Structure formats: C-alpha cells, structure tokens
C-alpha cells in the first residue's frame, strides 16, 4: 500500500486529474466518486460499472482505503468510540454520540493540539501533525462501516445524521484539509451530509473563522 495512491480524500477535480494521468476519460472520476463515497466500496474488483481491465489497473496503482481501527468500544448509553491508527502509526479518536434514532459523529482534525484548553484532554498533548483530508474523511467512513450505512441512506433514514469537527485538535488550525473534507462530506453525489448538519467546533481562531464564513458553503460554527 505504501506505493499506492489513496483515492479517498481527493476532491472531484483531483480525482478527474488522477484519471487523466492514467489516460482515462473524465467520466471515470464520476463513477469512482459514486462507488467510493455513495456505495462505500473499497475493492475495485467489485466496482462493476468500470471496465474489467481498468479495475485491474487501479488495483495495481491505487487504493480506496480507510484508516485502521486500533480499538472500538461501545458504552451502555450506546456511545461508540474508535481509536484510529493511520499509516505512520499515529492515532486519533472518533466518537459517535447517539440520540434516540440518529446521532453525530465527532471527528478529529489533528494528532495532538497546539492549544491548552483546560476542558480538553487533547490540550495536554503536544501537536504531532495535522490530519490529511483522506484521514479526516476516512474517520467518517469507518463510522459508516460500523453501522452498515452503505449505500448512503436518504436523509431521515440514517443513524449517523450529523458531523461535528470536535475530536482531537483545532479544526481551523488545519484549514485547507478541513475544507477539502467538508466538501466531500457535503457532496450530494456521495456522503451527502447537509451543510446544516455539519458543525465546526473551534476555540476561536478569528482569521480562520472569517475564511470559513466566506466559503461557498456555509457550515455551523
């Protein structure tokens, strides 16, 4: 896997560029987007709308991979927590907080944090690095795997209904990767989480708040 490029976390434009570099037509990006983000498929061999020889080539050069679950715990109140391990061995937490028939998944944006908020355990840890868009999106996909919510359920028929960027780290300190991940979360042709159901929890980085306010899509703060 070290020599293979992970397609998870690429924007539609980046995915189209990746396909062009393979000598493929732009519509391949649309097909892959559907299989990866709507169907939740990780095995190219199972992406049956793709030509068989193209699937074989993708298997040699690319992956559509999630991060690894190091530990999963479910409490009596049905809260579910995953300790996620990334390719370099670093770890972060992802937590699903349920309500009666829906709930929110809290996603990490960094390993460690530069801030020292007294209410947050992550504030006692040094910042190791920012998470990539692939690692941020991958956490949500791990949660969907756990609850069997593939293909992407229609709104109102899904347990994981909301996303809160409130795991480890300060999301707005990792702005570029955050925005790329939010766009993938929000895509109506993929994960399809409405902007009004996505919240970015911040300690208050004013310049980045202004940047987020000027983004094409408006998310909750």
Image (tube, rainbow, N blue to C red):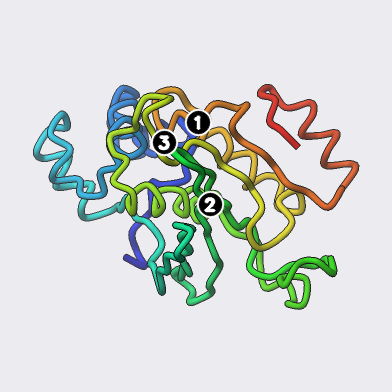
Residue tagged 1:
193
Query: Quick check: marks 2 and 3 in contact, CB under 8 Å?
Result: no
Q: How dense is the environment of label 1, judged by Cα within 10 Å: few (below 14), some, or many (20 and up)? A: many
Residue 209 point in image, percent of width and height: 83, 38
Q: Nearer the viewer, residue 49 or 212?
A: 212
Q: Could you tell me how far apart the alpha carbons at marks 3 and 1 are, in whole angstroms?
A: 20 Å
Left or right placement of residue 102 versus residue 164 in this view: left
Residue tagged 3:
15
Q: Quadrant of the N terminus?
A: bottom left
Q: Could you tell me how far apart the alpha carbons at marks 2 and 3 are, in whole angstroms?
A: 32 Å
Left or right placement of residue 59 versus residue 121 in this view: left
Q: Residue at x 27, y 53 (%)?
A: 61
Q: Residue at x 39, y 34 (%)?
A: 158
169 in relation to 152, above or below: below
Residue 115 point in image, percent of width and height: 83, 66
Q: Residue at x 58, y 52 (%)?
A: 106
Where residue 181 sits, quadrant-wise, is top right
Residue 66 point in image, percent of width and height: 37, 56
| SS for dot 2 | strand
Task: Select label 2 or label 3 by which is in front.
Answer: 2
| SS for dot 1 | loop
| SS for dot 3 | helix
Residue tagged 2:
97
Q: Nearer the viewer, residue 50 or 73?
A: 73
Count up the numbered dots.
3
First in residue order: circle 2 vs circle 3: 3
């Amino acid at each position: 896997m070290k020599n293979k490029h992970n397609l998870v976390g690429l924007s539609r434009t980046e995915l189209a560029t990746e396909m062009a570099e393979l000598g493929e037509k732009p519509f391949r990006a649309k097909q892959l987007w559907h299989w990866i983000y709507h169907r939740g498929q990780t095995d190219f061999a199972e992406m049956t709308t793709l030509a068989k020889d193209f699937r074989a080539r993708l298997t040699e050069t690319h992956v559509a991979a999630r991060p690894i679950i190091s530990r999963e715990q479910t409490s009596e109140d049905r809260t579910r927590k995953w300790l996620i391990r990334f390719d370099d061995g670093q770890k972060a937490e992802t937590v699903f907080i349920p309500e009666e028939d829906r709930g929110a998944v809290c996603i990490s944006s960094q390993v460690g944090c530069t801030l020292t908020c007294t209410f947050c355990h992550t504030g006692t840890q040094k910042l190791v690095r920012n998470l990539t868009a692939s690692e941020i999106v991958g956490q949500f996909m791990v949660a969907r795997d756990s609850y069997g919510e593939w293909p992407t359920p229609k709104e109102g028929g899904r347990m994981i209904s909301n996303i809160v960027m409130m795991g480890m780290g300060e999301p707005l300190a990792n702005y570029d990767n955050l925005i790329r991940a939010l766009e993938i979360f929000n895509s109506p042709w993929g994960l399809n989480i409405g902007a009004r159901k996505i919240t970015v929890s911040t300690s208050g980085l004013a310049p980045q708040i202004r940047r987020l306010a000027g983004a094409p899509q408006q998310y909750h703060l």
